[in-house]
Image (cartoon, grey):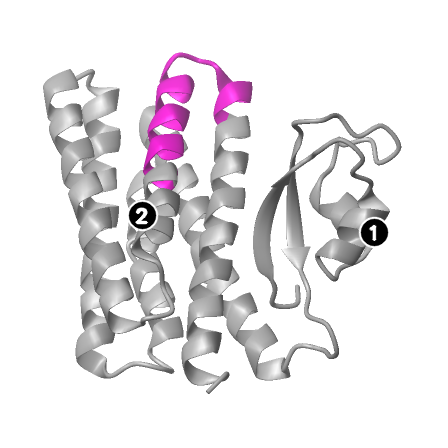
Amino acid sequence: MDFCRTVFHVVQPGDTFYRLAQQYHTTVPDIITRNPGVNPYNLQVGTRLRICTGYEGGKHHPQQMDLNNDMRKAWSMHNFWDAMFMISLFNTLENTDAVQKRLMRTPEDIAAVFEKFYALPIVNQIRQMLEEHVRLAGELTMAMKDNNTEQAEMLENQLSQNADRLARMLANTNGKYDYEQLMRLMKMHLDLTSKAMMAELKGNHEEAVDLLDENEKNLMELADVLTEGLVQQFYQR
């Protein structure tokens, strides 16, 4: 998928996919693809649309496309192995240890994308904070399985604090990043993950799948935001 800035547009009276495609410099087929289930001939006011914005007057540079693909893949794999670990642990599957081991590699995969731009001390900070995130999330999964409410609440607070430190560090490193935007997306990831765990524990498997799917979309937005910040800092000088 080509690099783009993902935005969410709330349908207003008079909106059509054609007008939105012109407004955001994209195409009607692309909007349709990114919004399955939305009838393009009967848009409902208030509907939230996911739109990948384009740029007037040219194509994206191949390096920027590769960067966005790498960023998206790294965060997508984090979401996938996070979900696999939850399912394996909750169902006491034999592959739980192997899945957890693979999950613990996802911080390195994400940090490797930033390694192309930042000095090693900064990359190490990113990796270490993400490793802490994965560790705390794993402990939260175990606490929820054991119905340890007090431990789960403590871990959720620690996860939020970790997200805050990561968002602030990234915003301080790159002036193109907006702390509030990064924090919103990271906290959304934490919230959706927690809700998916609760749904799975209660046996609401379809709800859990829907929440994991929403989490994937949220992380792809985060990946796009992180990519855009790097593009603005290093490619658009």
User: Which residue is the extreme one toward the right?
Assistant: 41
User: Which residue is the extreme one toward the bottom?
Assistant: 237
Seen at 46% across and 60% down, the residue is 225
- Is the residue 176 above or below the residue 39 in the image? below
Residue 192: image location, x then y, percent? 40, 32
Nearest the viewer among 49 and 37 is 49
Is 19 placed left or right of 104 in the picture? Answer: right
Assess disc 1: are there few (<14), some (14-19) or many (≥20) residues with their C-alpha within 10 Å of its C-alpha.
Answer: few
Mark 2 or 1, nearer chain start: 1
Dominant SS in magenta:
helix
Residue 196 inside the magenta-drawn segment:
yes
Seen at 42% across and 39% down, the residue is 84
Please give the residue where the numbered disc 2 appears in the rendered image. 183
The amino acid on which the numbered mark 2 sits, given as a three-letter code, is Met
- Magenta segment: 189-208
Is 45 placed left or right of 19 in the picture? Answer: left
Residue 88 - label: none
